[in-house]
Image: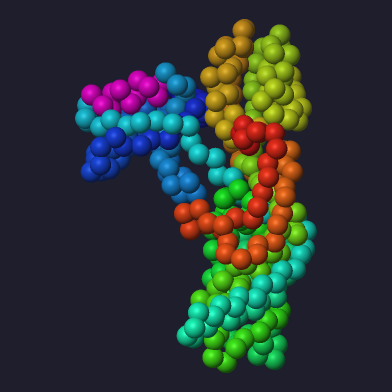
Amino acid sequence: MRSVAIPPPMYGVALELLERGQEKKLSDSLHKLSTEDPSLLLKFNAQVNETILRGMGELHLRLVLERMKEEAGVEVATHPPKIAYRETVTRPAEGHHRHKKQSGGAGQFGEVFLKIEPLPRGSGYEFSNKVVGGNIPGQFIPAVEKGVKQVLDEGAVAGYPLQDVRVIVYDGKYHAVDSKEIAFVAAGKRAFMDAISKAKPIVLEPLAKIEVTTPSGSVGDITGHLSGIRGRIAGSDSVSGNRVKISAQGATLRAGRLSNDLLSLSPAAKASLRWSSIITKPHPSRYRRSWKRPSGPPTTSKGQVFLSVSIHGGASSLW
């Protein structure tokens, strides 16, 4: 007997418990439901710290969650999954910062010179120490890297983690009395921010490879819709049954909603969708940035330090 091919689940929601202490009940119930229904996919996205439930559409997931509430007594709120935007740099640059603080007693002093280079997409982060002559004593190099890693975690453009960059510390200065770890953490952080401001930083957006198979009469509607949601058509091929397979790339956020979009296109309700192989590309938003080298105390927001960024065109352009 031939097995029935189950299309991959495309529509997803992030789940948030309404009552604390029900984490185990939620986990057990969702695993039970996904075992019974192979068209469900449960996944934890560690990048954004969310539990994602995917299914065949909005109605499908609504029925699943109502059943979970009735059978297990677990109720959740749902919202669209967060998008794992990232930041990176696009050209080499150098940065410098001298951290000097006197408050009547013991002072703080640390000075760092570094340069940064973009790495191929997906390479992560590299740090190397090229300081010679003891200009920064070896015991303070980990403090410099600690400051750099704070920027990697917090971002420098829009608050997203920064990736695919090589950091090379090549010079600096220290004071025999006033130099301490906290001073080199601050100097490393601000020197890195200084370099980023000169390295044409960009926001990376996760993209999905999309395949839509549709009756040939609906190709125009489908391609028009994909183009309207920032999809890039890669090509199309004729398949059996007077149908056409359209290949495209699109924003992950839009791809997750595309199954619902197709249902609203007539007669595109007969179309089938598949998306996979997430990659990252520069976000196409038109930014105009006003970079200002920090002078004085950094601007903070919940412990984060940002460069001054002006975005024209409205926040909606980010999505």
Query: Which of the two residues, 7 or 230, is positioned nearer the viewer here?
Result: 230
Question: Is residue 137 highlighted in magenta?
Answer: no
User: Residue 314 falls in which quadrant of the image?
Assistant: top right
In the image, taking residue 282 as reference, residue 181 lies left or right, namely left
Determine which quarter of the picture holds residue 170.
bottom right
Q: Kindly report the secondary structure that dominates the magenta region of the rendered protein.
A: helix
Position of 301 compared to 274: left or right? left
Location of residue 98 with respect to 39 vertically, above or below: below
- Please report the residue visible at 65 percent of the width from the left and 64 percent of the height from the top: 295
Q: Residue shown at 75%/68% (left/top)?
A: 94
Q: How far across and down, in percent of the image, does residue 264 sit?
A: 57, 12
| Residue 232 place in picture, x, y as percent | 73, 30
Residue at 64 percent of width and 23 percent of height = 212
Q: Quadrant of the C terminus?
A: top right
Q: Start and end of the magenta stretch?
A: 60-70
Residue 312 percent across, percent down from the top left: 70, 38
- Considering depth in this image, is 308 or 34 the residue closer to the camera? 308
Determine if residue 142 is in view: no
61 part of magenta stretch: yes
* Residue at position x 54%, y 29% in the image: 256
Q: Is residue 194 left or right of residue 263?
A: right
The image quadrant where one finds the N terminus is top left
Q: Is residue 262 visible?
A: yes
Which residue is the extreme one toward the front?
104
Above or below, comparing residue 60 to residue 13 in the picture: above
State the image coordinates of residue 34 (x, y, percent, origin top left).
36, 32
